[in-house]
Image: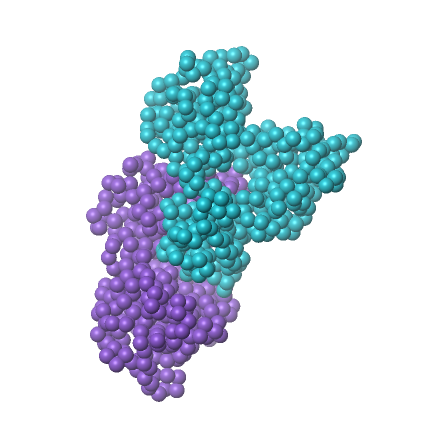
Chain colours: A cyan, B purple
Amino acid sequence: MHLAVIGGSDAGIAAALRAKEIDPAVKVSVLLADGFPNYSICGLPFVLSREVTDPTALAHRTREELESTGMELLINTTAREILPKDKRLVAVGQDGHEKRIGYDRLIVATGARPADTGIVGHTLPGVFYLHTMKDSFDIDRHIVETNARRAFIVGGGYIGLEMADALTLRGMEVTIASKTESVLPSVDPEFGRIVEEELRRHGVSVHVRTSVGSIYRSGRTLNVIDASGQNHATDMVVLATGVRPSSELARSAGIEPGHAGAIRVNRRMETNVADIFAAGDCVETWHRLLARSVYRPLGTTAHKQGRIAGENAAGGECQFAGTLGTQVLKVFELAIARTGLSEVEADQEGWKPATVESNMWDHKMYYPGAMPMHIRIVGDRSTGRILGAQIIGHWKSEVAKRIDIIATALFHGITAAGVNDLDLSYTPPLSSPWDPVQIAVQAWLNQHGK
Amino acid sequence: MHLAVIGGSDAGIAAALRAKEIDPAVKVSVLLADGFPNYSICGLPFVLSREVTDPTALAHRTREELESTGMELLINTTAREILPKDKRLVAVGQDGHEKRIGYDRLIVATGARPADTGIVGHTLPGVFYLHTMKDSFDIDRHIVETNARRAFIVGGGYIGLEMADALTLRGMEVTIASKTESVLPSVDPEFGRIVEEELRRHGVSVHVRTSVGSIYRSGRTLNVIDASGQNHATDMVVLATGVRPSSELARSAGIEPGHAGAIRVNRRMETNVADIFAAGDCVETWHRLLARSVYRPLGTTAHKQGRIAGENAAGGECQFAGTLGTQVLKVFELAIARTGLSEVEADQEGWKPATVESNMWDHKMYYPGAMPMHIRIVGDRSTGRILGAQIIGHWKSEVAKRIDIIATALFHGITAAGVNDLDLSYTPPLSSPWDPVQIAVQAWLNQHGK
């Protein structure tokens, strides 16, 4: 059996590794458009901040480690066409020559790419997206060669915020513009504003409700014109305005699109075409709470979907259990985490949601270093079920794994009262006898309890 | 309705607070043997280390905060007798006079006290237990007044280890003796030995498989004689050899004992005597996995049981959901956490357990400050169900809340494969796309997978 995988990032490599684990006899070939297999693209901001000094350290595994599993890596090889009837791929290799690659089963893991911003001037020199290793090299070279001191970031989502942190650490003067009411629209505005404070505290200039219409160059300076006509002079622009699925190759082979133009898959990660699976940022994602597919590209999800596609393609049997959109982000000293639905989202879905915010210390205040922690719990007033949570606190105060306690409960439909019943760990330097997440659900129960 | 509560520590105050929340009209009186209501006795080691400079900071709430709920606090008041037929208590108050206190419902929260060690010389000056505020004041005074430089700790459980850390921080030369194969017998010896290394790295002299027979004084020096006849000269001894339930008062009133002499309660925290509830370190505890009661005194459990006793006593209806023995401990730079059963315990209970240990980094190694993390997963080979876990790592690497992810899964009977399916949070500074707990369950599944 020959399994071909198009794409050598998180989903593609997870699929290839799992297929070899399930059945070492399967021949696995991974086609990879660039020369960086299995790279953690989530690490790119930390390369640009210079917190990571060696970009090759971003590889989850080295090429040698990957090849030692027996998989074949076809680097700098771009798939041009899928021919499902012939079970063949047409690809262009390193040497520029077209080649044909037969397969028994195929996994499409072509990822995503930056969405078209519609901003006039987005192709000017000094204007960048950040999506690939090459993008990060280009940005780095621009900063060094032009001695850029000022950066303007378009987009207040998690990549925009990580870049604001990274370029500030690098000593640049950073401005960020978000068209939303507050930065980080994946959390409530109350939390978005705490993040804005943290950005300003570190010298970042923050503009919300600000969309960018055009960029033009005058001499060495780039001018970013926002919707109100204000001109922001800068030395470079980073466009962090979201991604869209790279699904064209699949679509041209008759593979059906689903939500938001992403490849439609079932929970075995099968497309509508026999023996073709798909996984990662190019596919739609089953949402466990919504019980339907959405487009929610995330590294964690890509790894899981890839593993499932690989297992099923190699003759196994498993299903994707679904996403909750669980995420955490570090911005300067803060960690911001979320899982599940916001009140607005839950309301649209027909729940009877209510949000209660609580403020406490991350651990017993008498032990040195206690830091404030804020938790918002969204629960359903009819059933008492937890629907979502958001936590913000110092990045070293276990914000990330606290959201995961709620994510684990949510994943299994546990109520607010059920979270209060959990037997969680405690020592004064790290928590309180009721963990902050339990203090937060108690506050919710006191107002809306069942 | 008059609710009397005997005991003003974690369980007693939790009960009183909850009763006032459920029904503010209930009259609540709390009898307290000393003058320190609602003190975090888990904080005593940090007072002795001088990390906490003001011992009154250990109060979870001030006396004023407690009284503002409307509860009555009878400090320095010791209950001598419970008269269930008359629904009255006999107590001795601050003034030394006996008084009678009527009640409609009673909650017994008399806690625990150090178990008798049988060590000859345990009452000598300079030999201490650590269980109350007064004990910590006595130890502190001894160190200051005698200028004690050396401390000998008997017992390698969590209090012994916290004291070894605390007294080392205070500049003392510390020796610890544990009769067990390795320190911290609540985790596997493989992990106990990592803790021993950490102790030695900080200058603590560690003796395992070492029991202490007697202590004698010669001049200013205390001599600790271990079972092999070796003499350890020291300036003070701390006996950290476990506790037993303070259940005598209850027993003399006809309240039945259960496991290990602790008060028998049902899951509503009712004793066998009408209108008398009990909670905290004086009662037996329902174990969720074993489906029977054990004696497992812990602050987290005391708070939960107290809350449930208070709710039910005030006319509510709720049940204790059970313990998993979830615990975390900080020793110098390490956090050690555990939940559920060890392989040995699970085997005794008729499961088919297997343990797999994994070693990884707490977050992506390319981001600065990655620390090694060790995880042991105990799963049932027949069902794939997770039965327990232990984690050891740097105390700032989210060890505590990672054990809580497993504790949450375990609490709800989730399998190893189910933990792998969870949608957990990730950012390179705080985790990896598969969280360490998922990497650990994958390793378990690879060996014993279902």
Compared with A38, B307 (above or below) is below
Compared with B326, B437 (above or below) is above
Quadrant containing the C terminus of chain A in the rendered view:
bottom left
Is residue B170 found left or right of A193 in the rendered image? Answer: left
Quadrant containing the N terminus of chain A in the rendered view:
top left
Residue at the spot 41% in from the left edge and 52% down from the top edge:
A382
Residue at the spot 65% in from the left edge and 51% down from the top edge:
A201
Residue at the spot 26% in from the left edge and 41% down from the top edge:
B383
Observer-nearest residue: A286 or B231? Answer: A286
Residue extending farthest to the right is A219
Observer-nearest residue: A275 or B367? Answer: A275
**Percent coordinates x, y for residue A369 in the rendering:** 53, 58
Observer-nearest residue: A445 or B134? Answer: A445
Is residue A247 found left or right of A68 in the rendered image? Answer: right
**Percent coordinates x, y for residue A438 in the rendering:** 43, 57
**Percent coordinates x, y for residue B39 in the rendering:** 43, 69
Query: Is residue B144 something that shows in the picture?
Result: no
Observer-nearest residue: B349 or A218? Answer: A218
The picture quadrant where one finds residue B118 is: bottom left
**Percent coordinates x, y for residue A126 in the rendering:** 69, 31
Query: Is residue A115 something that shows in the picture?
Result: yes
Residue at the spot 44% in from the left edge and 38% down from the top edge:
A287
